[in-house]
Every structure is written in structure tokens, then in C-alpha cells.
Image (tube, rainbow, N blue to C red):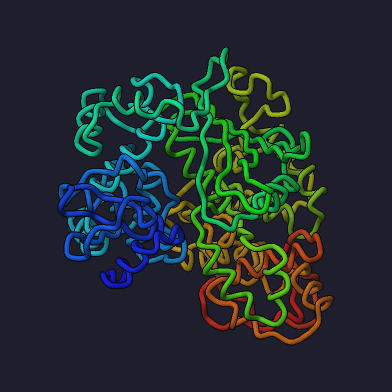
Amino acid sequence: MPPLDPDLCYAAASSRDARFDGRFIVAVRTTGIYCRPSCPAITPKRANVEFHHTAASAQQSGFRACKRCHPDATPGSPDWNVRHDVVARAMRLIADGVVERDGVGGIATRLGYSERHLNRLVTDEVGAGPLAIARAQRAQTSRILIETTDVPLTDVAFAAGFGSVRQFNDTIRDVFDASPSDLRRSGRGRHTVTSPPGLAAATVTLKLPTRRPFADREVLDFVGARAIPGIESFDVVDGVPRFRRTLTLPNGNGAIELTQGDAAGRESGDHVVVQLRVDDWSDLTTAVQRVRRMLDLDADPVAVDRHLAGDAVLGPLVRAVPGRRSPGSVDPFETLVRGIIGQQISVAGARTVAAKLIEAVGSRVDDSLIDGWSDLGYVFPGPDAIAAAPDSAFSMPGSRRDTIRRAAAAVADGHLVLDVGADPDEARARMLELRGIGPWTADYVIMRGLGHPDVLLGTDLGVVHALSDIGGSSDPTGWAPWRSYAVHHLWASLGAAPVPARKSSRRRAQPSPSPSPSPSPSTGRKDPS
């Protein structure tokens, strides 16, 4: 990450431009507090401020969070979604709660570095090490739960990832200069969302912030159209879309319900409302981060739209729906299985086939987790279960069944790593080693499973047909580094689902998920089966 330009940062803070919230932190030396760039307080003198990449860095320097602008309630930095170097991958693993589960050593092992070297790399880049960043994340989660929910403070401590109530109390006092009880009293009436009563599972309702513009209806419609019965459901109640699904989490299972946030005039919202239910409070932060990735809530829509709107083909689509996201997933392995199932069948057909597989080998969730959500019942089966599934569980040709088993076995034995810390180029290469997985499936997993922003599914029939229908000329290499968003605009222009191109007589070079030039999506082929 390049060094922050103090003059540019001060100009952004002086204008109170909310687009920079989450990109950097403003620390005021005379007051000892740090703020978001859009803080409504009087702008301090230039000589009295310094700038940090992260809240953790500001905390390391002795600053406390502002009680007025709540800098810890902003969307995450979009930089970690765009980049795929070791620091970015480490930041995604930290956000997923790996430090709390496995320590810094666990992240270092996954990335292939020593713990000392990883600490040095992260500290040099963002001004704080992995432990400090994880501590700042715990503090951020705590404050949100304390001030905007009625969750008991003891449960807040463990939901945020603290190992003890004492550690929780000490951290809150250090970061916010107030006790947890003080924060709760001061937060009364601040858009508090209460949890539904009478539920046995650990339950909380939260507002997940994102940057404007935000095409919230479109992103919920996209994931809803692909809902697999048994683990997902989608409906529209009084004109408001509602998406539900179950989650497999490190310490148990979870379930979510997503609805649109309030927006005056429905021009563009700035958050999504999620009801989260978890077997174990310690999984709450992980569940929140996975939902954020699924909905692409940390994206920078202004940068994406500005870049794509200048293209002759994409411009009208971008202007028609500003803030369109590139939805990811809660589980990259699940995305791989769904991608293989859907290689040559419709979305509706793929949903039916996947539902039968889940019913055959998926695990049932506890009834308390889905109380009132009778349309859910299972969690998606893990790689071990699918690799050992009987033939009767697969309603598909034998070749595709064997491909799914090979992929599941590769993930189960660690040959293929699919998680938020995976290197996308290495993951793509490993997938292509497996018989039955071709470029379309591998690129689809990189785009949605790993959340890569720059994947062009050039052989996808939806993309090919959309470009043909729109007409005009455009060079897809000019869409980089946001080609995944271009794909979603093209799909939406047809109401199309992702479909790999049918077999042709010629094999063409396939697009890479990297920002390197990709071929024109004029012809293509299906993945081998």
C-alpha cells in the first residue's frame, strides 16, 4: 500500500468526503482521538493531525476512537479486495477471525511465511501488526454490539472474539476511554435494533454499512435467484426482498436473514439489515465478514462506476444501475461445487441437482437455529462428506459426479486451498489440474468464491450474447481492473445466468483472473466433462 499523502488526506478530511471513510484514519494530536474523514466536528489545524491506514495503527500510537463520528462503524477498506499480495491475504484472514482461532502463527503457516516475517510485512505496510489489527477488529465489533443491540455485555465479549470479560473491559477502556456500560448508556436510542425475543440460538440483528451508491435490490435479487432449497431461500415481502441461508462456521453452524436497509426515496441505501443466528457467539464476527464478502459490501462503487462508465458498451448499463456489486460467496468450496454442477445446465436445473446432493449428505441444523425459518434445514456439506458421497447422491452424468468428487478430495487433503487467504493464481492452476474443470469453472470460482474484482468470463454465453445484443465495439482489456463488475452488468442486461459457452470446433485461449489482457469473448468452449 503506498504511503498516505498528508495534503490529499487533509483535503479529503476538510471536505468531509464520506467516500474516504474506511480508506484512512485522521488522528488529532491535540485531543488524542482518531476520526473518520467525514467526521462532522470542526476540522483541526493541519499541523495538529496525522494520518493512518488503519484504526489499529492509530490505536498503537495512543489515539482513542472519536465518540461523535464512530470511525469503527465504516465499511472496510476496498484495497484488500483489489489486492492479492501476502499483506492483503493476511488482512482478509484476520478479518475472518483466524487470529482468534489459530493465532498469528496460523496465518503465517497458511501464507507460507514465518510469524516474524509476516509481522514485519504487515506492520511496515499498515502501521500495526496482526495482533493489533485483530484487537482493533474486536473493539470495533464490541462497540457496534454494545451501542446498537441489546445483547448482554458478557455475550458481547465472546461474540467479539475476546478470551475473557476482563480482557474485553480493558480493551474497551483503552480504545474508547469508556467502560462497556458507559458505551451502552450513551448509545441508547442510536438506531438500536433489538433482537427477536424467544429464540434459543444466539441471535442479533445488525446494520451492515456499505458505500453509496449501492444497488441493494439487485445484489439481493442476484443471490436470491440462485438460492438452493434446503440451505437458502428467497422471497419478496411487501415489495422488500428477503434472503435466508445457513452457514458452516468454525465452532458450529449459523443462519442469516438479509433485507434491504432503509433509504429515503429508495434511490440508494447505505446498509443491509441482517439477522444473525449462531450456535456459538464466538462465530459472530466470522459470520458478519462472510456476509460482507457475499454482498461485496466493502467495494468502492464510485471508483468502479467511474472507470466502467467511460466505456461505450458498458457506460449506459453503469449509468442505469450505479453501485452494482460483484457478489461473492460465504464458502469458496461451495462455489466450486455449484460451478461444476452448473457447467451445462440452467440455474433452475442446477438448484434442483444441488438440493438433492445436500439432502443426501448435508448435515441437519439444530431446530433452534431456524425457528420460524422452516424453508431452511441443512448446511452445505463439507469436502469430506462430498468426496465420500454415494453415487445415488449425484443426479448428474457420471463424469461430472467424478469431477465433484475429485475436487472435494483435493480440498479435503489440502492440495487445493480455497479460502479468503488463498492465492488466486495458485488456486486457479490447481483447479485446472483436475480433470473436468476447465477455465470457465476455475474463473467463476476465482470471481465469486474468492471475490476477485478482475475476472472476465469471456467464454460465458451470457456475456457473449449480451455483447452481441448491445452491439458496438469495446476492448475488454480496458475494463480492468474491474472486469468482474463488467460481467455482472452484462449478465443483468439479459437477465442472464452464468453459463459456460458450448463446445466449438476450435479451442481458444481463456481469460485469466489477473489484470492481464484477455481475448475477445467471441467464441469459446464448455468445460470438459
Image label count = 0
Against 237, residue 226 (above or below) is below
In which quadrant of the rendered image does the C terminus lie? bottom right
Q: Residue furthest front?
A: 42
Where's residue 372, x and y in %? 68, 20
> Quick check: 365 above or below 89?
above
Of the pair 20 and 281, the residue shown nearer to us: 20
- Is residue 338 in sight in this rendering? no
Residue drawn where x is 74% and y is 71% of the image? 463
Q: In the figure, is residue 497 to the left or right of 17?
A: right
Quarter location, residue 434: bottom right
Q: Quadrant of residue 139?
A: top left
Do we see residue 405 in this rendering? yes
Residue 135, percent from left and from top: 27, 41
Q: Residue at coordinates 60% horizontally, 72% vertically from top-left? A: 483
Residue in view at x 25 percent, y 33 percent: 172
The correct choice, above or below, for 22 with respect to 358 in the image is below
Q: Residue at x 53, y 52 (%)?
A: 297
Could you tell me residue 25's position as x and y percent?
A: 30, 56
Q: Position of residue 240 (x, y in %)?
A: 73, 39
Q: Is residue 208 left or right of residue 315?
A: left
Say which quarter of the image contains residue 378.
Answer: top right
Residue occupying the far top of the picture: 198
Quadrant into which the N terminus falls? bottom left
Q: Nearer the viewer, residue 478 or 51?
A: 51
* Pick the front one: 418 or 228: 228
The answer to whether residue 14 is left or right of residue 391 is left
